[in-house]
Image (spheres, grey):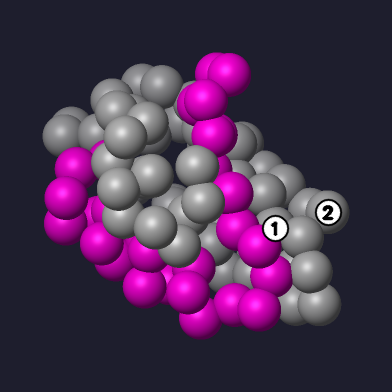
Amino acid sequence: MKEFKYVITDPEGIHARPAGILVKQAAGYESAIKIAKGEKSADAKRIFGVMGLGVKTGEEVTVSAEGADEDKAITELEAFFKENL
């Protein structure tokens, strides 16, 4: 399993538009992709799970990938977060 931590810088936090884009990005990987905030975690391939975390600006999330393409997934997702969130 690979993971990274990221502090959200988007002024709106993870709202509907970036959450939708994140879900599409995560769906492109064979690996299981999880996003966690504090004690709560969600499947990053499910929009309601991502939105249910209620991530706000300045909060830290942990993104993890586990599976056959975890190295590729974690590298690309980290770049995605830096560009979009």
Q: What stretch of residues is rendered in magenta?
A: 14-41
Q: Is residue 57 visible?
A: no
Q: Are marks 1 and 2 in contact (CB under 8 Å)?
A: yes
Is 25 a magenta residue? yes
Q: Which residue corresponds to mark 1?
A: 65
Q: Is residue 13 above or below residue 28?
A: above
Q: Give left or right: position of 81 versus 32.
A: left
Report how far apart the C-alphas of labels 1 and 2 lie in the structure.
Answer: 6 Å
What label sits on residue 1 in the rendered view? 2
Tag 1's secondary structure?
Answer: strand
Q: Give left or right: position of 40 versus 46.
A: right
Quadrant containing the N terminus is bottom right
- The amino acid type, in three-letter code, at marker 1 is Ala
Q: Give left or right: position of 43 versus 52.
A: right
Camera-side residue: 48 or 77?
Answer: 48
At horizontal 66% and vertical 79% (from top left) the residue drawn is 30
